């Protein structure tokens, strides 16, 4: 019973923290995300590619060779 009470207190505390989080409408959040993406698309390596293969963290490191 004590474990259940502690679990309920934990849930209650989490709900209290979530209740004070500022909320915005989905349409406003989408507009803000689109604005951010458009402002930062020049810095996005996945859109523009990498200056060289050395700075590409997704490149294949070494190929496996079996003798």
Image (cartoon, grey):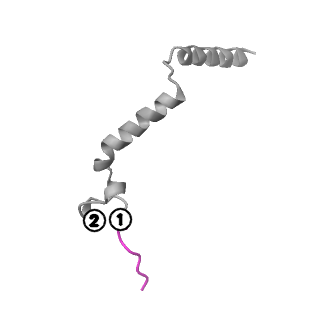
Q: Are marks 1 and 2 in contact (CB under 8 Å)?
A: yes
Q: Position of residue 67 (x, y in %)?
A: 42, 86
Q: Residue at x 36, y 55 (%)?
A: 47
- Which span of residues is magenta-colored? 60-67
Sort mark 1 into few (<14), some (14-19) or many (20+) by Cα contacts within 10 Å: few
Q: Magenta stretch containing residue 23, yes or no?
A: no
Tag 2 secondary structure: helix
Q: Which residue is mark 1?
A: 59
> Would residue 10 appear left or right of 38 to someone viewing this image?
right
Of the 4 image quadrants, the one containing the N terminus is top right
- Residue 52 on image: x %, y %: 24, 64
Left or right? Give the position of 52 relative to 26.
Answer: left
Q: Which residue does the image show at 47% across and 30% down from the upper left?
A: 29
- How would you classify the magenta stretch by its main secondary structure? loop
Q: Earlier in the sequence, mark 1 or mark 2?
A: 2
**Front residue (pair 44, 3):** 44
Residue 17: give its label.
none
Quadrant of the image occupied by residue 61: bottom left
**Residue 15 drawn above or below residue 59:** above
- Disc 2 designates what residue? 53
- Residue 63 forms part of the magenta stretch: yes
Tell me where residue 42 appears, x and y as whole percent.
28, 49
Q: Secondary structure at mark 1?
A: loop
Q: Position of residue 24 (x, y in %)?
A: 50, 23
Instruction: Specify few, some or many for label 2: CA neighbours under 10 Å numbering under 14, 14-19, or 20 or more.
Output: few
What's the distance in space between the residues labelled 1 and 2, CA to CA? 7 Å
């Amino acid at each position: 019973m004590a474990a259940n009470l502690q679990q309920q207190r934990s849930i209650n505390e989490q709900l209290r923290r979530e209740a004070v989080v500022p909320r915005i409408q989905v349409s406003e959040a989408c507009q803000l995300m689109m604005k951010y993406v458009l402002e930062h698309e020049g810095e996005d390596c996945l859109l523009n590619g990498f200056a060289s293969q050395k700075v590409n963290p997704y490149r294949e490191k070494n190929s496996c060779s079996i003798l």
